[in-house]
């Protein structure tokens, strides 16, 4: 996995920032907060899940996404986002 693939999309960065700030959200709420449509958000989340940066759990038809805290790269990205937001 190349870091450029993760950070090359403004939409993916927005999603990562939102999940870092909020914790867990469903796709519709992530899409609303990121200003993206549902399909685009779903595609970005699939990429992030393929990189093992986010995970989801399913409740019926609802999928809840969050950072994959077990992945050291995901933890570091979350720390970077949190640090970046604190130093504004």
Image (cartoon, rainbow, N blue to C red):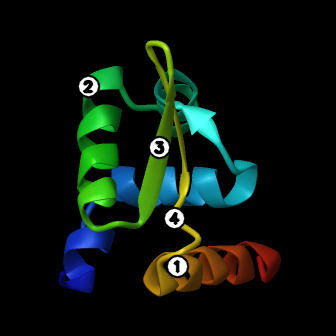
- Disc 1 target residue: 77
Q: Secondary structure at mark 3?
A: strand
Q: Position of residue 47 (x, y in %)?
A: 24, 54
In the rendered image, the quadrant that contains the N terminus is bottom left
State the residue position of label 4.
68
Q: CA distance from mark 2 to mark 4?
A: 22 Å
Q: Residue at x 54, y 26 (%)?
A: 32
The image quadrant where one finds the C terminus is bottom right
Q: How many residues crowd around disc 3 within 10 Å: few (fewer than 14), some, or many (20 or more)? A: some
The mark nearer the N terminus, 2 or 1, is 2
In this view, 58 is above or below 22: above
Give the residue drawn at x 39%, y 31%. 36
Towards the viewer: 6 or 53: 53
What residue does disc 3 label?
56
Q: Identify the residue under disc 2.
A: 39
> Residue 37, located in which quarter of the rendered image?
top left
Find residue 51 and report its horizontal and vertical position in percent.
27, 67
Nearer the observer: mark 4 or 1; the answer is: 4
Whether 86 is drawn above or below 12: the answer is below
- Describe the element under mark 1 as helix, strand or loop: helix
Mark 1 or mark 3, earlier in chain: 3
Question: Disc 4 versus disc 1: distance between alpha carbons?
Answer: 11 Å
Q: Earlier in the sequence, mark 2 or mark 4?
A: 2
């Amino acid at each position: 996995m190349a870091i450029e693939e993760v950070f090359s999309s403004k939409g993916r960065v927005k999603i990562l920032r939102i999940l870092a700030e909020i914790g867990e959200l469903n796709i519709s709420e992530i899409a609303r907060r990121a200003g993206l449509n549902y399909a685009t958000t779903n595609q970005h989340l699939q990429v992030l899940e393929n990189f093992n940066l986010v995970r989801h759990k399913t409740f019926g038809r609802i999928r809840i996404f969050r950072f994959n805290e077990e992945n050291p790269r995901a933890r570091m990205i979350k720390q970077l986002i949190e640090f970046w937001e604190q130093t504004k």
